[in-house]
Image (cartoon, helix red, strand yellow):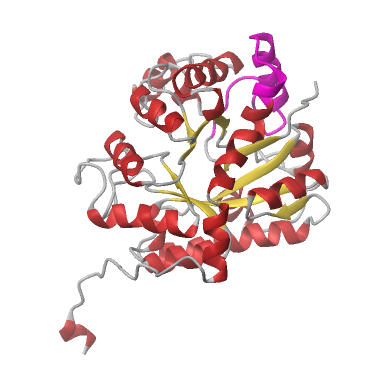
Amino acid sequence: MTNRFPVIDGHNDLAWACRIDRAYSTDGLDQGAPKLHTDLPRLAAGNVGGQFWSVWVDPVLEGAEQVVATLEQIDFVYRLVDTYPDQLRLSRTSAEAKTAMADGKIASLIGIEGGAQVGGSLAALRQFARLGARYMTLTWSRTIDWADSATDEAVHGGLTEFGRDVVREMNRIGVLVDLAHVSPDTMRHALEVSSRPVIVSHSGASAICDHQRNVPDDVLASIGEGGGVVMVAFVPSFLNEARRLWVEAGEHGEAPPVGISDVADHIDHIRKIAGVHAVGIGADYDGTDAMPAGLDDVSGYPALFAELERRGWTETELRGLAHGNVLRVLEASDDDYRAFLSGAAGEANAEVIVPAVDTEQRN
């Protein structure tokens, strides 16, 4: 089965998986890596035209450790591209991604998966942007100093004022605001503040599966109205209510099946609520153990597109889903990003969250 529509996927955790299992080695990924969801032969089989490589850091690391580990993750992406220049090309903008795809390369983009990774410093955010990070997920699974997570206690009621400043600074420097992982109130606050289209890099629709990580219909509609894009994850417990309940009950007995049709149901629902211009794909390969039947690894995208075509999606709509919608959202912030890199983006916000210092110990 072939896929006529090159996919730009919004979220892949290969970098962290290679940290854990391969000591950050990039060797052999062109020969197949059976312990992973991702390698170069399977990316080619899936007709992947671009990938946002997630640079995620486990929150057991704190403060400066998170910043250092993020730099290590970004370094992995650079080394991955350098190891396989015939297959991959680092891309920072929509234009660069389009050129890479036209040249037969996989456009390799970078996304930061968690606002804690900037260590409370907008300066760190700007440095990550200079290294090529084009989106940042406002939180990961834990509530942080300035934003509530979907899967932790809400203590701020959404975004704090510093959190709103983070969103404004991301707009100013051309870093996309990613609303995956955040609480519904954080989503709504970010949409109120953001002057640029936002993304959800890897989530589903709450109306189909009531997982905390999924997006409510009112937020889906707002994202669509603002020109953003919601990229559907393939995580089984995000997709299927019976599977969610099974996981939350402690995974006893046989797992309720989840397949390609479940992913297609979320895509169809987001299309209905947010618009066909507002849906994309962010599978979360190598970020979770289980995947739907038929979408076991990055070679599986053609089967999903075949299912959607069977449901009546047109070539133009499928092309938008595959890559056109996310490239349009990226392009909407590209001028801001270029202005930032050139020093023409206006005055930087220097605010930081400064931790308390024990002056006696310091002295």
Residue 343 is left or right of residue 5, and the answer is left
Q: Position of residue 320 (x, y in %)?
A: 64, 29
In this orientation, which residue lies closer to the viewer: 208 or 132? Answer: 132
Residue 343 in sight here: yes
Q: Is 302 a magenta residue?
A: yes
Residue 323 is left or right of residue 164, and the answer is right
Q: Position of residue 213 (x, y in %)?
A: 38, 32
Residue 309 is left or right of residue 4, and the answer is left
Residue at 69% over, 62% down: 79
Q: Position of residue 31 (x, y in %)?
A: 81, 45
Residue at 38% over, 46% down: 194
Residue at 80% over, 24% down: 2
Spot the residue most to the left: 360
Residue 24 in sight here: no
In the rendered image, the vertical position of residue 339 relative to residue 48, given as above or below: below
The quadrant holding residue 280 is top right
Quadrant into which the C terminus falls? bottom left
In this orientation, which residue lies closer to the viewer: 322 or 233? Answer: 322
Q: Position of residue 315 (x, y in %)?
A: 72, 20
Q: Which residues are magenta?
A: 289-318
Spot the residue most to the top: 311
In the rendered image, the vertical position of residue 269 relative to residue 50, given as above or below: above
The quadrant holding residue 73 is bottom right
In the rendered image, the vertical position of residue 318 relative to residue 98, given as above or below: above
Q: Is 217 a magenta residue?
A: no
The quadrant holding residue 7 is top right
Residue 305 is left or right of residue 110, and the answer is right
Quadrant into which the N terminus falls? top right
